Amino acid sequence: MRVRQKIRWLTWIGLTGCLLAAIPALYLLHFGLVHERERLVGELAQSARAVLQRMDEAVVKGEMQRQDAQAHARLAVDALNGGRFRIELFTDGAPPSGWPDDGRTLVTHLSFEPWGWTVAAAGSASDIDRALLEESLAFLLFFGVLLVVSWPLSSFLSEHVVGPIEGLSNGMRTLTEGRTDIDVPGRDRDDEFGAMARALEYFRRSTQAVLERDERLLGIMTNVGESIVLVSADGTVEERNPAAVRLFGADPAGRRFIDLFAEGDRDRVAGLLEQSGARCAPADAVKADALGILRDGTGIEVSLALSGLVVQGRRSFIAVLADVTERLRHERELLRLATRDRLTGLPNRAMMEQLITAAAARARRDGQWFAVLCLDLSRFKLVTDTLGHQAGDILLIEVARRVQTVVGAGNAVGRVGMDDFAVIVESADADAAAQVGKSIVAAFDEPVQLLGTEHFVHPSVGIALFPQHAGDAAELMRAADTALYAAKKQGGRRVAFFRQELGEQARHHLAIDRALRRALVGRQFLVHYQPKISLIDFSLEGFEALLRWERPDHGLVPPGEFIPVAEETGFIVPLGDWVLDEVCRQQREWIDRGLASVPVAVNISPRHLRQRSADDFLRILDRHGVPPELIELEITEGAVMQDLDHALQVLGDLKAMGVRVAVDDFGTGHSSLSYLKRLPVTTLKIDRSFVQGVPHTREDAGIVSTIIAMADMLGLAVVAEGVERPEQAAFLRHHNCTLVQGWLTGRPQPASAAMELLADRIRERA
């Protein structure tokens, strides 16, 4: 039964008790009043008899006559009559029947024997009954009023006293059931109930936070991939998440934690538990990897992180485990891949550097020399381009086999690049290293079978000696690479030792490369224009754009010093884009000034041509709004032959858009008529090496006249470059080559001077 109902029942029971207690009380009161009235009637009769007694005594004494005494007695008794009482003297000894006749109910008779009289007294109780009735009515009225008042009073108590208590009680009961979505009433009250309500609200929020945290933790524990195990201080598993059951293949709860691991790792796990005993923060977790456990009869490897935990003075451990079998396998595989070449299985560059470092340590300890040999293959890209990458892989595997056979098992062989190999020859001086290098070159005298075809490999070998040429692995590799570069420049199938001047040259090239990149940003490049002149009327017919580099601290740098470096490092591509962009910008300026511009030839390097499409070149022209016919791209035969299909596509698209295409240095390359017929060119440029010999050298004169005749037969324009003497100009004009450039007709000059030539051309025509 609720408190609210109990209070109401108690109120009604109390009122009923009061009512029941009032009934006997009224009865007893009535009984007492009647009894008191009877006593008074008796005493009144006694008083009357006493008066008769005194009168009788006066008669006996002779003080009064009997008749007088009796008369006085009657007067005295009559004096006692009145109010609620009546008293009479009956001389005949008894009151008559029916006395008193006025309804009085309380009667007392006393005999006075000396005179033979009877004293009768009577009293009425009707006033007592009326009083009792009035009191009863008053009590009933009071009781009714009390009943009426008790209902709102009980409601008030229920609402303001019992209600808050019940609300708090219901809230506590709901909270004990795990529900926190309740509204605690009375929090804004200023009394004790408000304080209790605020305390309950704080408890509710705390409970809600705890429950939410427990739900989140339970969700994490249930869904996290890692296995989480709570280990007691005595090493027994107390709690675990589902991932732990899956990890161990059975429920580990109740088992000793160290017994879950492989026997060989249990001492290690026990040591980890002991080590983490003094640590109580997750950041101080003790970690271990590659611990073995047995699951379903299969051994797996796990990682373990142990953290100490103290809750209410009780110490335990949190163990986080994860299956790392696959990860460790991948790491071992990655380590192998990081140190071994996937194709040949040889050590890669990183591992070779470690092996060289170890060899250097042994050589220092034993006071010996050793050699590092670097070699690469000629025409390897040609193999992959023509026969495919499968053939290239076969070639590399065969090269690795032959080199290992030559150097023997005691020396390390590694693949350090696409087609680059390195060899460490232990305890070798210069003669021994040179002999190994020659043996490697000789090992490829026999061709390699590639997909049914024979291919001859022409390796070049560079050699660096420790400690003569370098003192650490990186320097030795660089020195051997530098020597290899020198061997390749000698034509291939060569063995070359590192020399100090080679290192200086390599460092110079690196410095040039860095300076070139800074120069492009710092606007240190400029374009000079060499005029192309007609030998018929000596009019200006075009320019060739020549790149110049004006270094602030060196002045003008000859193109022969930086163009080869730019080509080798690939910087020639952005540099070539800049030159074409600058020429187009200059052409646009000349056009805007009203000058009748002439075509300007721009040299395009082989690498530049390979890495750009026709759209890339046309995009530069469109940016400045230059008509395509005012730009001529000069390429070499070698540039075309490096990637013939790409060159034909790019040059064909450019020619179709109106861009002129010239073959520069014609006669020094392949000079194949079949290729020339396929090339979408408009102009042939006779190389200066042939022009210098005319007209006195018969071979040069024959070559030049043949080139001119061939160009005329193919419908191509011809430009002779390097014309420096009048007799050369006369010979060319005689053989119908009328367009020349060289110091005889004009040296390269800045854009301002070229603009003056254009202005003079307009004035001459005017």
Image (cartoon, grey):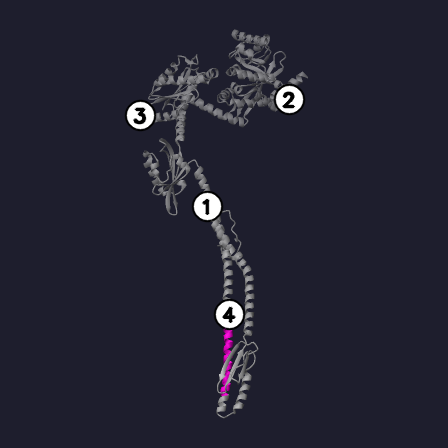
Marks 4 and 3 in Cβ contact (< 8 Å): no
User: Eyeballing the image, is 276 above or below 585?
Assistant: below
> Residue type at mark 4?
Tyr
Residue 223 seen anywhere in this rendered image of the structure = yes
Read off the residue under disc 1: 210
Residue stretch in magenta: 26-54
Q: What amino acid is at disc 2?
A: Ile
Secondary structure beneath disc 2?
A: helix
Locate the C terminus and report the quarter of the image it occupies: top right
Q: Nearer the viewer, residue 149 or 239?
A: 149
The reply to whether the magenta stretch includes residue 52 is: yes
Judged left or right of residue 243, residue 193 is right
Q: Amino acid at mark 1?
A: Val
Q: How many marks?
A: 4
Q: Nearer the viewer, mark 1 or mark 4?
A: 4
Q: For mark 3, give the secondary structure.
A: helix
Q: Quadrant of residue 443?
A: top left
The CA span between labels 4 and 3 is: 135 Å
Query: In the image, residue 2 lies at what x, y percent?
Result: 49, 54
**Residue ID for mark 2:** 591
Choose the circle earlier in sequence order: 2 or 3.
3
Image quadrant assignment for residue 400: top left
Picture coordinates of residue 646, whole percent (x, y): 53, 17
3D distance between C-alphas at marks 2 and 3:
75 Å
Residue matched to label 4: 27
Q: Is residue 67 above or below residue 742?
A: below
